[in-house]
Image: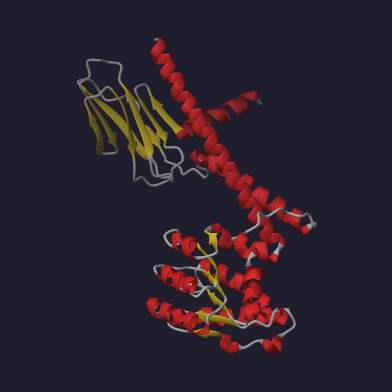
Amino acid sequence: MRKTLFYLILFALTSLLAVSPELIISDIPNDDGTGLKIIWNIADESVEKVMIWRGEELIIYSDSLNGEFNDRNLVAGDEYEYRMDLYPGKQTAATIIISPKPEYFNTDKITLLIFLILVSGAIIYYIISARTGKELYIRKISGLESIDEAVGRATEMGRPVLFVPGINDIDDMQTIAGLTILRKVAERAAEYDTRIIVPVARSMVLSTAREVVRTAYMQVGKPDAYNEDSVFYLTDDQFGYVSGVDGIIVREKPAANFLLGSFYAESLILAETGFSSGAIQVAGTAMPSQLPFFVAACDYTLIGEELFAASAYLSRDPQQLGSLKGQDFGKAVFVVVLVVGIILEILNIHIIKDYLIIH
């Protein structure tokens, strides 16, 4: 039994590594099977030139007695014949025949696999916990907590609520996140009998937004109060759309403005116009270059991932809550590993410096 095992191991090793006394050829690890590593080590110092052939093609011509070379652009599974000539000297006695093979697993990315397993396990754990009724803590997002306050203020003042879901189409995740929050805003507007205005810049967003608002009114038991004209299309043109929204702000004077979605240069114009009208403003986007304008001119701002976390925060759906908590766990692990790595690197540098000073 032991003899058989020995021969099996020997066969596996020889299939991956071909050796002659002065020439070693091995499969390149973690590649797609299109390369072989060639290492030569000549002990005879009288040798002046080293020539290595693949079949009839000279691939290495070197005056170095020691070296290595990666022979690329081969075909996985094909057999290749290598031989080495020395000058002055002789041709190597052995001819090496070897086939490159692809690896099914890249060991250089084992850390990424461990991290993926940890995060995936955390997401599954939190989803199961949420489904069993366990209360999962989600940090309060002040911008979403302010929805009731903003809509309530508009109701007291007898003025409408304006909701702008960004200027990109429905294929943008920020637009989807904005429409998720729109449902919550529309529910509150329906409960308080407050008029809501939703101007959009894309036809697909128009259809989706109308359905979201209609569903919100049905959810609170007031389907007859829904007005289809409250959600309307302006234009696809960026600054034409902004001009139209600014006109609505000036004419209608909404008491609460929600700017949630994807924005570009128009963010400053919208935020400043809303600020000048005295409205409560809740803004949110994942566009880093536009966030400073919202922070400066709006009462509440959802920064980056807070916009995407809104769906889980508002709906309390177990699957969304579990995914959000699992992602937070992954971020925490990443931060801990990063901090530990920095500390170890600093300590390593100090140890090396101390060693050099002593010696």
Query: In the displayed structure, does residue 16 sit left or right of residue 59?
Result: right
In-image side of 289 versus 86 (left or right): right
Quarter of the picture holding the C terminus: top left
Query: Whole-percent x and y of residue 171?
Result: 50, 71
Left or right of residue 94, residue 277 in this image: right
**Residue 218 location in percent, x, y?**
71, 82
Q: Is residue 95 something that shows in the picture?
A: no
Up/down of 10 relative to 130, above or below: above
Query: Which of 319 and 310 lies nearest the eye of the viewer?
Result: 310
Task: Give how far across and how far down residue 62 sits, in percent.
Answer: 23, 28
Between 76 and 35, the one lying in front of the other is: 35
**Residue farthest to the top?**
359
Q: Can residue 38 be seen? A: yes
Judging depth in this view, the residue of 61 and 269 nearest the camera is 269
Q: Which image quarter holds the N terminus?
A: top right
> Would you place residue 209 above or below residue 272 in this image?
below
Residue at x 39% of width, y 68% of height: 265
Labels in figure, total: 0
- Determine whether 50 is above or below 115 in the image: above
The coloring applied to the image is: secondary structure
Residue depicted at x 47% and y 28%: 346
Residue 80: x and y, percent?
Answer: 36, 39
Q: Residue at x 42, y 46 (%)?
A: 76
